Amino acid sequence: MEYASMSKEQLLDLQEKLQKQYQEYCNMGLNLDLSRGKPGRDQVDLCNDMLKVVQTGEDCICSNGLDCRNYGVLDGIPEAKRLFADLLGIPEANILVGGNSSLNLMYDSVVRALIYGVYGGNGPWSRQGKLKFLCPAPGYDRHFAITESLGFELITVGMTESGPDMDAVEALVRDPAVKGIWCCPKYSNPDGYTYSDETVRRLANLKPASRDFRIFWDNAYAVHDLYEDRHDELLDIFTECKKVGSEDMVYYFASTSKISFPGSGVAIMAASENNLRQIKPVMNIQTIGHDKINQIRHVKYFGNADGIRRRMKELAALIRPKFDIAFRVLEEEFAGTGAARWTRPNGGYFIGLYTSDGCAKHAYQLAKKAGVVLTTVGATYPYGNDLRDSNIRIAPTFPSHEDLELAMHVLGTCVKLAAIEKQLIIRFS
Amino acid sequence: MEYASMSKEQLLDLQEKLQKQYQEYCNMGLNLDLSRGKPGRDQVDLCNDMLKVVQTGEDCICSNGLDCRNYGVLDGIPEAKRLFADLLGIPEANILVGGNSSLNLMYDSVVRALIYGVYGGNGPWSRQGKLKFLCPAPGYDRHFAITESLGFELITVGMTESGPDMDAVEALVRDPAVKGIWCCPKYSNPDGYTYSDETVRRLANLKPASRDFRIFWDNAYAVHDLYEDRHDELLDIFTECKKVGSEDMVYYFASTSKISFPGSGVAIMAASENNLRQIKPVMNIQTIGHDKINQIRHVKYFGNADGIRRRMKELAALIRPKFDIAFRVLEEEFAGTGAARWTRPNGGYFIGLYTSDGCAKHAYQLAKKAGVVLTTVGATYPYGNDLRDSNIRIAPTFPSHEDLELAMHVLGTCVKLAAIEKQLIIRFS
């Protein structure tokens, strides 16, 4: 029975039962974590042989004779560009291979725009007065943190199953202070939604008032499918942009952080030739070059894009059962209660859980007291502000099956307790 | 006989002989390079076994249980901090381990100051109007390039055998627009000079008008001695600063770029606790963390600071003969001519050659035509402007012994031809 239809007595009765259950969890002295979008140890173990593929000086020599052990090459060794080009369907000429962190490439791209401006733009953003950035939400807190830290006003845009609310985006970019939009277009963080073809096309066809406007296309989960039989398909943004001549509007990012080793992977940026011509000279002031041995290590280990695709299936085989546990427990806990809804992504790293409005923070506190750490409520919104107090990001990849099952049940109990208390207050007090 | 004392006939006679020699070099179709501060292949070969020390998942586990293969830790694994602390004589608590490039840490430090300001300063440098930076010259072109690119006016300060002209520095920092100074304090690039104790103390005792002022202490050649029997000793800047409470004035940088693999080494920044408390939250917005597997790879390979010191002796054994070839040929070519003087560093990567004023560019062009690439004349000065047109940076580490000997002779001939032409013009035309 839905909580909203229960009588006061029924609610109090259920509350008492759940309180007992909650107290039992509290007495267990748990220390569980559902907050981190972090691979499990079994996932990183899969990649251990990468540590063995570059063993000698000869292993460090590129096909063009370049010695990865020494100085030289700013934007990536040719075979690394080719690997990512094949994997992502982007021409090699548009790829710049960076260091270990795509987030770092994103941060540096905003900083570069602030200090030097962007190709075809109106000069340094820092001299253009008020700056705004569009933040489809719920979204990735670290995206929002970059632009907040760098002084932008964050404009929240609603996130839907087909991507950002494009009516809102099209209206907002008429403001020349709006310089960009954060996009996690495939298996979005945290909902796991993939932008529809229409959304990608409307983004490619945007007519922003500011020539500086850039789409920050963080394709973090480009090849991170969970199931053999159903994948989301994302249109290639560059292809759509080229049809209308807007390819300078896109900064594209990806990395192997959730393919090889998080923190010791390889990140890339892809952009139009015009953009790269502006970016590379600045990067050449910033660094002599990125770690080429790690680039060739990735190339030798995976061999080619198919090697990465095979690995993604092996990783999915490890992650899928965890998502399935999460989905099953969510169903067990919430079916028929109306106390929560959740997303059912086909890939990525997260599940978006939505409690009844006004219940997420309360549930978070209850879970914390019971020893279960959740992603900070609100973190998925600009300024940490979830106006509905509803979204809880579930990251099921790191815990063991047992820990995950238990943590999900604790979460279920906490959300239900919060929902019942809300019912009691709004309907019976 | 000194060229300055030769008669016109003697000069013309010598010119003819040197022209013949020069023509012979030109006819050889040479393709030699004395411009790059790049280790030779034999040097990087020395480090090949580093590729083999981290082979398994277990090898990636830190002493505190942290798994280097996964996310976690912004500022470096404990054993990497300890390694650099022992090597450089800096407390672990003051060390932040970064990515592969100390230059990147320097660039980001200037950018951070521009956007966020520095600890105890007057807010973002970008809002403080005119910005100036002190550039002891000749110096490292990439230092100057960072501050030029970021909009600073570069103020040239004379470089002496004991470091920057401290009278000039002390006078210049009375200008509140002066926000910092570039220092390569040991075996300086390009002269190979080491700052005297007095210089270090006067720097530690600076009283800049601006509370924002920072000493960028790029100790790139901290342990890069060439000889067993004579080393330069550099006072520890932090120790001197602590005596007078000025430790917040120093940003310290170092890396293993010329210890392990250039481009795949580990870079560090060291700073006071006040400075680190301001820096780390910004870095935490910029990245999730640096490559920890490469950090533990370095720790496991070198073992401890003594392991690095032993390696530096092996590297010196490879580099020293190249410096000795360079010194010998310089002596053979220039002894008694007065056409050039040069530095005789006890370590580092470079020799500073000084032609007669007004001869460096001409010599550079002659060498280029003969197939010998030199560091661009002027590159060692702010804005590429060597007012004396005299300094040529010699980088002897990369070529083979044979190539180096030949290239140095070509260089000698070119500098002498330029010097004779100058004598003929200023004295006899």
Image: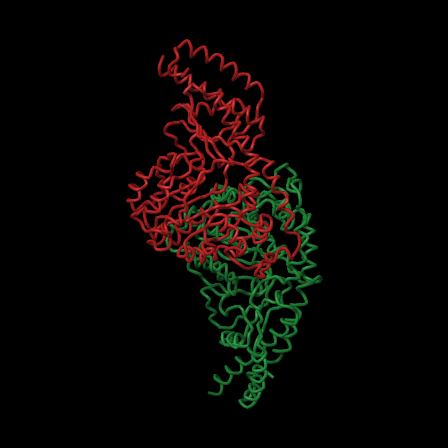
Chain colours: A red, B green
Q: Quadrant of the N terminus of chain B?
A: bottom right
The residue furthest bottom is B9
Residue at 70% in and 51% down: B306
**Camera-side residue of B147 and B325:** B325
Residue A139 vs A358, above or below: the answer is below
**Camera-side residue of A224 and A20:** A224
Q: Is residue B247 visible?
A: yes
Residue B53 x, y percent position in the rendering: 68, 48
Residue A90 x, y percent position in the rendering: 45, 51
Residue at 32% in and 40% down: A169
Within the image, what quadrant is residue B272 found in?
Answer: top right
Residue B299 x, y percent position in the rendering: 65, 47
Total marks shown come to 0
The residue furthest top is A9
**Camera-side residue of B112 and A269:** A269
Q: Is residue B221 visible?
A: no
Residue A391 x, y percent position in the rendering: 42, 29
Residue A416 vs A140, above or below: the answer is above
**Camera-side residue of A85 and B229:** A85
